Amino acid sequence: MPRLRRLILLALWPLGVSFTPAQDLPVNYDEDKVPAYELPDPLVMQDGTRVESAEQWYERRRPELLRLFEEHVFGRTPKQSLEIRAVVVNRTLAFGGRAVRREVDLVVPGKPDGPMRLLIYSPTQVDGPAPAFLALNFTGNQSIQPDPGITLSTRWMRQVPGRGIEKNRATPASRGTLASRWPVPLILERGYALVTTYYGDIDPDFDDGFANGVHPALDPESGRGPSAWGSIAAWAWGLSRALDYLESDELVDAGRVALLGHSRLGKTALWAGATDERFALVISTTSGCGGAALSRRCFGETVARINRVFPHWLCERFRPYNRRESALPVARHQLHALIPPRPVLLRSAHEHPPTCPPRAPTCARPPAP
């Protein structure tokens, strides 16, 4: 466990962040201004019945909490199945023969903007399939390593200074810009595989009325309702589809996949881990409002700010809770409770780095370990 813990700490910041200040929305960083609040008991059902057994939790309370988070926060992910086709685009040795590098396209029927492309590094020095870290990335697969064999993403991307992105598209200068946050050689040395895909391959991170990404492939023809799924639920859906593929992969032990995410993708990791019990470990860093933070504290990033700046992340039914956090029928500690008995690791930043704009909590991150 100490080795795994150290590896996790070194791998905790593999993702880039973007800044979208909302100066017109006040942000509270004063503990004295935190309002009085109460947290609902995870072990008390809506009708007041107390959970007294594991059977009650799994048969009644856990499904009830999942439904409440679906209806009021993340939105309902459509249940229909799709015939997703996996295509191995290339396969070659990497890192001097210490790894097998593969790119695999997951072709989703009805998705208008192309497949999800998985980048997989598997160690060659292990016997049998290797346990793996699975994470979405912010600026394309090519950003995690300066490897010219990784296909340059052509998807829309958020403008982030110093990331080699111009006019919302990755350029060759983006190769390896986040390599320091993705310790691939160390991961391989310790006997783990690494699996990643650009989150925009699943759903673009802008408010486009859900015309792109996986939403057109799964949304009902009758239209979207107030509890229809947002982008975070779509990204979580994509993580589960990646795990579907890994279950058929002879080089990866799909029963030992650790899921991790940072910032908005930390929110995504928590929701994916709550809804898909196949993930063996969930790691979420600096996930803020909508993730690990207690919205009822009204401290830092708030429900109103999330809904104003990123209206596509969560369902429409979440918006009436702006400045009414205590009216939500669920609280974040109940989201965390949906993951055990599988382990979950939560880490959050305390101070903003000096390059962050003032009052922009989503860009906060701690110093590198």
Image (tube, grey):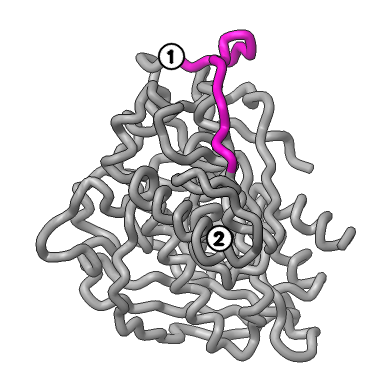
Position of residue 27 measured from the top left corner of the image (x, y, whole percent): 48, 17
Q: Main secondary structure of the magenta part?
A: loop
Q: Which quarter of the figure has residue 281?
A: bottom right
Position of residue 294 measured from the top left corner of the image (x, y, whole percent): 56, 32
How many neighbours does mark 2 have within 10 angstroms: few (below 14), some (14-19), or many (20 or more)? many
Q: Which residue is mark 1?
A: 26
Segment tinted magenta in the rendering: 27-41
Position of residue 325 measured from the top left corner of the image (x, y, whole percent): 43, 27
Residue positioned 38% across, 49% down in the render:
74
Which is more toward the observer, 287 or 93?
Answer: 287
Which is more toward the observer, 330 or 332?
Answer: 330
The verdict on residue 34 being magenta is yes
**Furthest residue in direction top, as rendered:** 32
Residue type, mark 1 in image = Pro
Which part of the image, by quadrant, shows the C terminus? top right
How many neighbours does mark 1 have within 10 angstroms: few (below 14), some (14-19), or many (20 or more)? few
Residue type, mark 2 in image = Gly
Residue 248, placed above or below residue 151: below
* Mark 1 or 2, closer to the camera: 2
Q: Secondary structure at mark 2?
A: helix
Tell me, yes or no, if residue 178 can be seen here. no
- Residue 273's label in the rendered image is 2
- Label 1 and label 2: CA atoms lie apart by 31 Å
Does residue 39 appear left or right of residue 222 in this picture? right
Query: In this figure, what is the number of numbered marks?
Result: 2
**Furthest residue in direction left, as rendered:** 222
Residue positioned 34% across, 72% down in the render:
115
